[in-house]
Image (cartoon, rainbow, N blue to C red):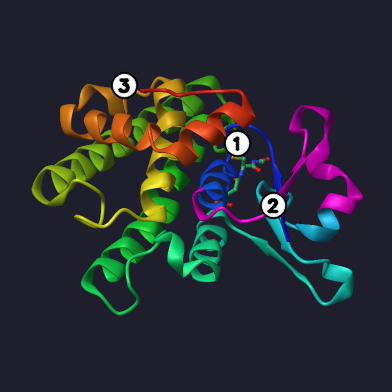
Amino acid sequence: MYTLYYDPDTASLAPHMCLLHAGAPYRLTLVDRAKGGLDDPAYRRLNPHGRIPTMTIGDPDKGGYVMTEAAAICLKIAQDHPEAGLMPEDGSRAYAQALSWLFYLTNTLQADTMVFHYARRYAATTAGIEQVRGEAGARLGSMLGQIDRSLKDGGPWLAGDAFSAADYFLLMVAGWLEQFAIPDPPSIRPTLSAYLRRAQELPAAVEAYRIEAHGPYF
Ligand SMILES: N[C@@H](CCC(=O)N[C@@H](CS)C(=O)NCC(=O)O)C(=O)O
């Protein structure tokens, strides 16, 4: 049994969609950030980084284990449930593409989204914060432009014909970017926008939004 430690519309969203897509039995445990849930010693024992998400597989005190990092958790769910098709067939070109996208999204798009959103952590003055936010916003716009072109050239999904967990990941981050009102949000790009509407209509996405009581954003 998986337990996903989550907070609505945070980095637990893509893992949540993957669990639903796989039809895997899971429990949800709310980590209420607003009430200091990230600093709860019991949560810190599971996730010393103090971030969401965390996923346990079985009981960590009885031979089970703990995973952190949303992209890694998505891959683990895909690997445990190959029949669900969350990743293309191992060894295929599409698998390599999906893996590349997943790493790209978590290392760059998600990372700069955090810089944009938490700009105050990267500068001490109002002008500095505005500069950090402006530069992150410009980088995000350029990344979204590149993703839009890739989808135009090789869609309908990130890995071509093969849907993958990377698509849930992009749906998650794009939803934040739409809400954070970056200068060039995902919705201004017709190909990307149509792709996001398609992704958010997938049953697992619809269900995750319903359970978490937010979205959809496109
Ligand atoms: N790379 C991590 C990032 C996780 C992350 O930063 N999660 C946010 C919520 S979306 C968080 O816990 N933020 C708390 C903080 O930055 O203090 C992942 O993808 O799991």
Q: Please state which amino acid type lies under the numbered disc 3.
A: Pro
Give the camera-side residue of 125 and 53. Answer: 53
- Most distant residue in the left direction: 153
Could you say where residue 134 lies in the image, as x and y percent from the top left? 37, 28
Closer to the eye: label 3 or 2: 2
Q: CA distance from mark 3 to mark 1?
A: 20 Å
The answer to whether residue 184 is seen in the rendering is: no
Q: Which residue is mark 1?
A: 121
For the residue labelled by badge 3, is the local secondary structure a helix, a strand or a loop? loop
Report the side of 58 relative to 217 (left or right): right
Q: Give the magenta part as a residue range.
A: 21-43
Q: Which residue is mark 3?
A: 183
User: Dot 3: within a 10 Å radius of its alpha carbon, few (fewer than 14), some, or many (20 or more) residues?
Assistant: some
Q: Tell me the kind of residue under disc 1.
A: Arg
The answer to whether residue 68 is seen in the rendering is: yes
Residue 159 occupies which quadrant of the picture?
A: bottom left
Residue in front for this viewpoint, 168 or 44: 168
Which class describes the residues within 10 Å of circle 1: few (<14), some (14-19), or many (20+)? few
The picture places residue 39, in percent across and down from the top left corner, at 83, 43
On whether ligand 1 comes within 8 Å of the CB at mark 1, the answer is no
